[in-house]
Image: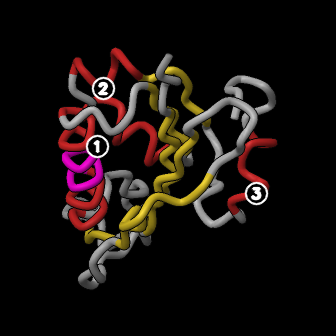
Amino acid sequence: MKHPITWVVLADANFARILENTHPGEGLHQIPAGTFKSPEKNSWSDDEGRTQSNIRNARLRLDKHTEQAPETVQFARTLIRTLEKHHRCSHFDKLAISAPPQMLGLLRPMLSAELKGVLKCELNKEIARVPTDEVAKHFNGAMRF
């Protein structure tokens, strides 16, 4: 009997890696070529801006800009395309994703119906750079590795 293969995607806005579990109880290991880095950001700033009022001679603060950097959006698309390609080739049967809130919110609507069908767990944590042997404990039993 074939055991289901689980891929665990750990991502943040600049870095992602894919870990794999092939048998329950064997833990996670890094897949070959499973590390992704975002391209360098181009002078993107999330500082609040200011504008000149046309009623009074005053400078007004603009609301904090909440849109994602274009490089981050492209990075998320690349990651999702990679997952779709590998799922079509039957490289994994189950999927778990861990990312901070903004990145998770960016990834969710990009997931295809096929990926949503195999998505078994979402974790709202930034653990992309946590050592591999410590990742499983962050899932608190939500997934068996």
User: Which quadrant: the C terminus?
Assistant: top right
Note whether 16 is above or below 5 in the view shown: below
| N-term mark: 3 or 2 | 2
Camera-side mark, 3 or 2: 3
Q: Which residues are magenta?
A: 77-83
The residue type indicated by label 2 comes to Leu
Q: Which residue is mark 1?
A: 83
How many labels sit on residues?
A: 3
* Residue in view at x 27 percent, y 30 percent: 111
Q: Label 2, label 1: how many angstroms apart (C-alpha)?
A: 8 Å
Q: Secondary structure at mark 3?
A: helix
* Residue in view at x 68 percent, y 30 percent: 24
* Residue in view at x 27 percent, y 60 percent: 75
Where residue 71 appears, as percent x and y from the top left, is 24, 67
The residue type indicated by label 1 comes to Leu
Let me know if residue 82 appears in the view. Answer: yes
Give yes or no for contact between labels 3 and 1 (Cβ–Cβ under 8 Å).
no
92 left or right of 89 in image: right
Query: Which corner quadrant of the image does residue 114 belong to?
Result: top left
Q: Which residue is mark 3?
A: 133
Q: Which residue is mark 2?
A: 115
Q: Bin the neighbour count of mark 1 within 10 Å (Cα to Cα): few under 14, some 14-19, many 20 and up.
A: many
| N-term mark: 3 or 1 | 1
Where residue 80 appears, as percent x and y from the top left, is 26, 44
Q: Bin the neighbour count of mark 2 within 10 Å (Cα to Cα): few under 14, some 14-19, many 20 and up.
A: some
Note whether 102 is above or below 32 in the view shown: above
Between 12 and 112, the one nearer to me in the picture: 112
Q: Secondary structure at mark 2?
A: helix
User: Is 79 included in the stretch rendered in magenta?
Assistant: yes
